[in-house]
Image (tube, helix red, strand yellow):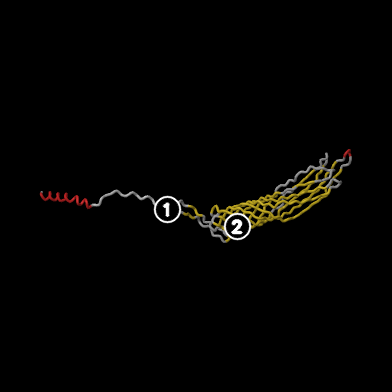
Amino acid sequence: MKFKLSAAALIAAGLPALAADLPARTAPPPPAPPSASATPFRMPTLVHASQGLWNGVYVGGAVSWDLAARDTEMTGPSGTSVTGALTRGDAPGVEGFGAGLYAGYNMQFGDYVAGVEADATALLDPWGDRSTNSFKSTTTDATGAFTATARAKRLGDSSLRLRAGYVIMRDMLVYATGGVALTQVERNWTMGGSITVPGTNGGAATTYSLADASGKDEKYRLGWTIGAGLDYMVLPDWTVRAEYRYTSFGETKANLSSACSTSCGTATSALRFTDTVHSVRLGVAYHFGGPTIAPISVRY
């Protein structure tokens, strides 16, 4: 019994010393604040894989639809025996379909493209509608009329232009273009006709005739052109195009005079040709030397 009490007393005496040798238990430290230099989360962005895609030479073919403005007018006769009411000539647009070739060279700087392009187009149905001026005598019961008729056709055109564009997708380019243009225009016109005026106090009727007259000219005209369009790469190295262009070749004037019989004066046809063209073009081209289309990559 004494042994058990002594052992218990010995253990009780040694507990304080043992507890002093054990490590102290403390609360865990709070987490450290995030470092100011830590990299923040970034949303992924799509990277164009079009770098250099539009570089190089290209050659293509195009079809076009043109609407060209024409304008004519007529004056005379200047005599007093026949007076007339002048009406301005009806000048409908010249509508024609064309086909041609174009070629150019592009340089790409990131998403921007600059280049130069030339094209030549021949109109397949170049004749425009006739434009006719007609006037009659104001004398009561007079019959007939004097007329001047003009017709023009544009045989074709060509241009040399600069281009500036932006790649809105890896394979889609929108651009603006402008430069000089050249066209070949052929015009012809005729003037003639007769007016019969009844006699006074039962007298004989008098017929006044314009001597038939005609003229023709063919000219090359230099002008300017501006436009905009879109190129889309449907296959590696192959693009399709849609383009609008406005072209102005200025105004020319041609005069044609015809003498009238029986002292009714001279009729003068003043033919004004204002050659402005609205053109819509669709094309297909092959690009040489550019890289093939790569898949779009993701950058973080």
CA–CA distance between discs 1 and 2? 41 Å
For label 2, the SS is: strand
The residue at the far left in this view is 2
User: Mark 1 or mark 2: which comes first in sequence?
Assistant: 1
Q: Nearer the viewer, residue 130 or 57?
A: 57
- Residue 99 at x, y = what percent? 66, 55
Which mark is on residue 39? Answer: 1
Which mark is on residue 85? Answer: none
Q: Nearer the viewer, residue 29 or 277?
A: 29
Q: What's the amino acid at mark 1? A: Thr
Query: Can you identify the residue that label 2 sits on?
Result: 115
The residue at the far top in this view is 201
- Which numbered mark, 1 or 2, is in the foreground of this view? 1
- Residue 225 at x, y = what percent? 66, 53
Kindly identify the residue that appears in the image at 85 percent across and 42 percent down. Answer: 197
Q: What's the amino acid at mark 2? A: Gly
Kindly identify the residue that appears in the image at 32 percent across and 49 percent down. Answer: 29
For label 1, the SS is: loop
- Residue 11 at x, y = what percent? 16, 50
